[in-house]
Amino acid sequence: MKLNEVGEDEIVRRLTRGLKLDQRVILGPGDDCAVVDSGSGRLLVTVDALVEGVHFEAGWLTAAQLGRKAFLVNASDIAAMGGAPRWCVLQVAAPPSTPAADLAALTRAVAAAASAAGASLVGGNLSRARELSVTVALIGDAPRRPITRRGARPGDLLYVTGALGEAALGLRELRRDAHAGGPAVRRFRQPPMRLRAAALLARAGLASAMIDVSDGLVQDLRHLCAASRVGARIALDRIPVPPRVHRAGPMLALTGGEDYELLCAVPARHQRRVDRLAARFGCPFTCVGSCAPSRAGVRVVDARGSTVPVIAGHDHFARGRRG
Amino acid sequence: MKLNEVGEDEIVRRLTRGLKLDQRVILGPGDDCAVVDSGSGRLLVTVDALVEGVHFEAGWLTAAQLGRKAFLVNASDIAAMGGAPRWCVLQVAAPPSTPAADLAALTRAVAAAASAAGASLVGGNLSRARELSVTVALIGDAPRRPITRRGARPGDLLYVTGALGEAALGLRELRRDAHAGGPAVRRFRQPPMRLRAAALLARAGLASAMIDVSDGLVQDLRHLCAASRVGARIALDRIPVPPRVHRAGPMLALTGGEDYELLCAVPARHQRRVDRLAARFGCPFTCVGSCAPSRAGVRVVDARGSTVPVIAGHDHFARGRRG
């Protein structure tokens, strides 16, 4: 079986089964971050890469935009656990013909994005390669109780930060024209940072489960539901989308991916508290549906209550899909 | 200026200049690992990658050998600071045609190598790519006083663990015949782990500076000397080499690279203590020369005291060189 016949989720499921973890590992692979015990407190660890020809094509991002995005997609994983980024290391594989100034701009952008998130770029490594790829590993301080994907219960409300679908629209525009500009392309180039919302949620203990939306809302909702062993029902017309995404079609918000917003389960009894708290998030925080017993599956319904058919989100390896 | 016109060392020097680091960063980029303050203790952080077409060609290593090596080259950086590996994350970029079983074998091998070093694989990420690359980021516990590259003084003795040149010989053999076997190829496939020697040196406080030999003895000696602002003189006939490396030529041990042994500076007054301690290293520990004032430069001398001309070691980006 080749990777493109198995699918990314199934591969990761197989790979993370049966790993031996020592007692200082609180939470191993399978969530947005690992949680480890440093002695005095808990740390979060995550890694993510942007690969040319997969996550972007030449010309879509400047070196600085690429470096910033490589940091932000990792910061999004730290946010999804309610943590605070602290230290990162950078691995760049680049063709020998890469301008040295680009590499400098990329590195400075990682360092600047880290700094803006309260973190430091502390080390790195540079390799030759045929295609450009940028990997960031990020260590963060965990909150007292990290928010995993696992704690959602039937009846919990489902919230998302910000708005969805715009980065996917930007990606579509860049596929048509590598020189495209405008707000959607800007959003593709610069994911949002939801660290403040995440930290407030973690401190208040209001979220039962959380994940960042990187593969598309429905795909990541399925991840959260699978980990929590629940189902979910979300209402299409409650999903926050900018008008231009709405015009381009609802699937962008459901399956487009690259949103890097947070999807969060909140017990219904905390609704009023979380709505009050959200005033301090610095971004919208919208209830889009609720969790259900697992037998109900994961459903998107339209205004009349009919199920909207959704083809699964982003898979790097599945045949014929983007990515 | 392109990367291949600037050279790796100069690029890294430029990139690490002027990075803003917060107060919880004890040592930033430029050494084998970064040192950060976790609150209760100090952690080491490092990252390294193996890229197909650069560090290996298809067929040279099985997936399991590749995974093990990707861990070990990082463990070598942790050893070079006197630390103990603790947690790692794995980023694999692989073509869609990669057999899923290979990915499973690679991941299990990283986990097994981590476990053998007292560490755990705690997370990872999988991306599509045209060429296979494996990145490991490794976090370790730092000793009370991490051994950096910076502390060597003129007169300090220079020691190396194990023996040099064999991995470079194995690489040469694989270049001639991708199906080559034998001890040199095995050594290329499996770097040594010098964690015990490193930890004993760190605990005893006997080493003034240390670096792992990954780019070739002379190149890494230059790195250590530059960081310590000293010169050095090493004796060609004291460098420990297996007989088959000796027959193949001394340059393999001086500039071959991929040794992943430790090069260590020891104040001369500690010579007898370090020689006694070395009985517990589980590997040879050989004095190959000593540090000198920086104006003396870095020299290799033969048995008659004549300077052996050495062309610099490994540079990923320099024109016409391997890597």
Image (cartoon, coloured by chain):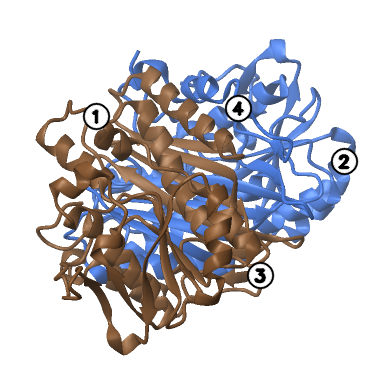
Chain colours: A brown, B blue
What chain does badge 2 belong to?
B
Q: Position of residue B13 (x, y in %)?
A: 54, 22
Quadrant in the rendering for residue A198: bottom right
Disc 4 crowd rating (10 Å Cα; few below 14, some 14-19, many 20+) is some
Query: Where residue B308 appears, x then y in whole percent?
Result: 54, 20
Question: Callout 3, which amino acid?
Answer: Arg
- Residue receiving disc 1: A182
Mark 2 to mark 4: distance in Å? 23 Å
Task: Provide the secondary structure element on which disc 2 rests.
Answer: helix
The answer to whether one can see residue A316 in this image is no
* Image: A57 above or below A99: below
Q: Earlier in the sequence, mark 2 or mark 4?
A: 4
Dots 1 and 3: beta carbons under 8 Å?
Answer: no
Answer above or below: position of A189 versus A35.
Answer: above
Q: Secondary structure at mark 1?
A: loop
Which quarter shows the C terminus of chain B? top left
Q: What's under tag 2, amino acid-wise?
A: His
Question: Between marks 1 and 3, how big is the CA–CA gap?
Answer: 47 Å
* Distance of label 4 from label 3 (alpha carbons): 35 Å
Q: Check disc 4 and report the residue beneath it.
A: B223
State whether discs 1 and 3 lie on one chain. yes
Whether labels 3 and 2 share one chain: no
User: Label 1 crowding class (10 Å Cα cut-off): few <14, some 14-19, many 20+?
Assistant: few
User: What residue would you read off at disc 3?
Assistant: A24
